[in-house]
């Protein structure tokens, strides 16, 4: 059932126009190596937010600065691999996330690759810039998500349809006001922008500073007449806080207005729709502009009274499919025809799961002690399911835990962090045939561990006797290391344990019993 709301904004005074402060957040120039200032806003190089990929320069003259570099990620043999930016965030804050792509031929083939983009544990959308690039344009994608932790990850990801290296040109994470899109259940959903247009407008994209959150409002015109008049609509009373400039133009009709919007067909899904109206103030005194709205023949809102102070009608869950037709008709008793100033439509995006936070923190600490970890070890370890980290297996709901690590023969070096013992749902640890060194940490908190393979490494020191206290341990392979001391009795006498300790270690023989 669609939920509809009407917000009528009344203002007694003209709005005071002043330059707003730039929205808080991060502007990341992907592939750049030094900061830059563009339109009085600082863009940061991306090296602090991503650990893989190759910066590349686009050799096309006259590009915007943020399109002249990009970061390219290797196309790996496995079909599903993600490469993530991890950006600091305020937990619970609502973010506008915008990604920008301009291919520039960096892969040596004519057409840009097609790939996925991911926010935290959710597949956001497919990135297909083919048509825009053929027309010499960049492509951008915009979504709204709430930060669940102190970081947000934004990833590009190869899929079965990815034929060359995926890439990204720019990444923006900007904090939105609490009231913006606040009718959305952001615990379970995100918003993925389909279209945002200002109707009857023919100028450049409206953005910051006109929009205090730097949302992009594209121009849109059709066969309906256009009117333009500067008016004093104060957007501060609108929950979504649109820029006042969108009310300077409108599409209007003397009778019924038919509007095919958004321009392209939609997937069969559920959408958030917001339509913005403000009377132009030119109607004769005493006249009334009241209209009825239908979307694809379904009543959207009845008897909407449009005044010079503005109104917005929004639906939080409206089903749509294919081409969308909006019809505005004068209501009974209305003296003048309908008009419309702007509209936004988002796809409602069901959020994927999240790995339990303490497991994420522990595994990140394990990763930080290793060198040459798999390239996709960033973002959420378990989600999206088809993009879980290489060598990581995860449990099913309700709490998503890490249950197995299989990194045998991965060319790893470094040491095994004691934090691995905090992954208390682990049943299997396989790190054999690498070049790991240092001591074997105390793993006794891993009470359901069943197999531990550390063979063919450079581990040193003594074998922790506490391994014998792990009740379910049935395989322990530690041969071909540099271990010393004695094999603990708790392991030698453990029933059902498949224990491999030699060759390649320096274990002491047990002391002979004292002479009688």
Image (cartoon, rainbow, N blue to C red):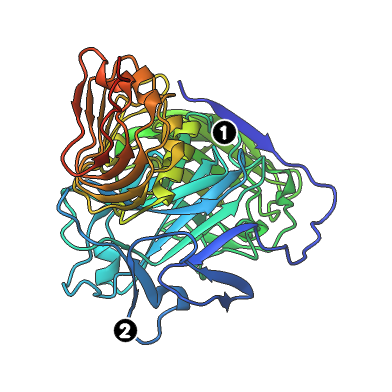
Quadrant for the C terminus in the image: top left
Q: Residue 249: image x %, image y %?
A: 58, 60
Which residue is at the front of the view, 471 or 389?
Answer: 471
Say whether disc 1 or disc 2 marks the residue closer to the N-terminus: 2
Residue extending furthest toward the right: 13
Quadrant for the N terminus in the image: top left
The image quadrant that residue 360 belongs to is top left
Determine the residue positioned at 48% across, 39% down. 361
Element type at mark 2:
loop
User: 10 Å neighbourhood of mark 1: few (<14), some, or many (≥20)?
Assistant: many
Which residue is at the front of the view, 393 or 220?
Answer: 393
Element type at mark 1:
loop
> Does residue 59 appear to the left or right of 110 in the view shown?
right
Please tell me the numbered disc located at residue 59.
Answer: 2
Q: Is residue 442 above or below residue 236?
A: above
Q: Residue 423: image x %, image y %?
A: 42, 30
Q: Is residue 263 visible?
A: no
Q: Is residue 155 above or below residue 218?
A: above
* Closer mark to the observer between disc 1 and disc 2: 2
Please tell me the numbered disc located at residue 331.
Answer: 1
Q: Residue 74: image x %, image y %?
A: 24, 62
Q: Distance of mark 1 from mark 2, alpha carbons?
A: 56 Å
> Does residue 438 appear to the left or right of 231 in the view shown?
left
Which residue is at the front of the view, 410 or 142?
Answer: 410
């Amino acid at each position: 059932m669609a939920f509809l709301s009407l917000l009528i904004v009344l203002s007694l005074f003209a709005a005071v126009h002043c330059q707003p402060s730039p929205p808080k957040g991060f502007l990341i120039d992907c592939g750049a190596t030094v900061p830059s200032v563009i339109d009085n806003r600082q863009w940061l190089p991306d090296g602090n937010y991503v650990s893989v990929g190759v910066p590349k320069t686009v050799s096309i003259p006259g590009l915007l600065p943020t399109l002249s570099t990009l970061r390219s990620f290797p196309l790996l043999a496995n079909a599903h691999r993600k490469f993530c930016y991890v950006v600091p965030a305020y937990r619970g804050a609502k973010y506008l996330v915008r990604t920008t792509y301009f291919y520039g031929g960096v892969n040596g083939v004519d057409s840009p690759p097609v790939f996925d983009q991911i926010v935290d544990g959710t597949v956001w959308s497919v990135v297909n810039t083919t048509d825009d690039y053929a027309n010499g344009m960049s492509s951008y994608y915009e979504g709204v998500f709430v930060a669940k932790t102190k970081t947000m990850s934004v990833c590009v990801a190869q899929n079965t349809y990815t034929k060359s290296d995926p890439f990204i040109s720019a990444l923006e994470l900007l904090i939105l006001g609490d009231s913006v899109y606040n009718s959305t259940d952001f615990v379970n959903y995100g918003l993925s922008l389909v279209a945002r247009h200002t109707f009857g407008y023919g100028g450049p994209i409206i953005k910051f500073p006109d929009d205090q959150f730097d949302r992009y409002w594209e121009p849109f015109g059709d066969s309906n007449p256009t009117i333009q008049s500067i008016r004093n609509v104060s957007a501060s009373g609108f929950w979504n806080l649109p820029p006042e400039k969108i009310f300077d133009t409108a599409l209007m009709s003397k009778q019924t207005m038919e509007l095919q919007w958004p321009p392209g067909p939609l997937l069969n899904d559920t959408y958030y729709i917001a339509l913005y109206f403000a009377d132009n103030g030119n109607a004769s005194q005493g006249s009334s502009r009241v209209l009825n709205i239908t979307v694809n023949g379904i009543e959207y809102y009845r008897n909407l009274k449009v005044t010079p102070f503005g109104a917005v009608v929004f639906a939080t869950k409206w089903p749509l499919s294919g081409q969308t037709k909006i019809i505005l008709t004068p209501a009974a008793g209305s003296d003048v025809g309908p008009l419309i100033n702007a509209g936004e439509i988002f796809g409602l995006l069901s959020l994927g799961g999240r790995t339990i936070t303490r497991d994420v923190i522990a595994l990140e600490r394990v990763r930080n002690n290793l060198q040459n970890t798999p390239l996709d070890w960033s973002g959420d370890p378990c989600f999206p399911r088809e993009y879980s980290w290489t060598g990581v297996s995860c449990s099913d709901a309700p709490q998503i835990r890490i249950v197995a690590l299989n990194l045998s023969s991965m060319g790893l070096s470094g040491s095994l962090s004691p934090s691995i013992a905090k992954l208390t749902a682990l049943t299997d640890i396989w790190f054999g045939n690498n070049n790991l060194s240092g001591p074997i940490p105390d793993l006794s908190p891993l009470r359901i561990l069943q197999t531990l393979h550390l063979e063919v490494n450079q581990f040193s020191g003594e074998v922790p006797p506490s391994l014998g206290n792990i009740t379910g341990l049935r395989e322990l392979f530690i041969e071909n290391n540099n271990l010393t001391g004695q094999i603990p009795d708790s392991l030698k006498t453990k029933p059902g344990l498949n224990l491999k300790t030699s060759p390649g270690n320096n274990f002491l023989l047990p002391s002979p019993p004292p002479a009688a």
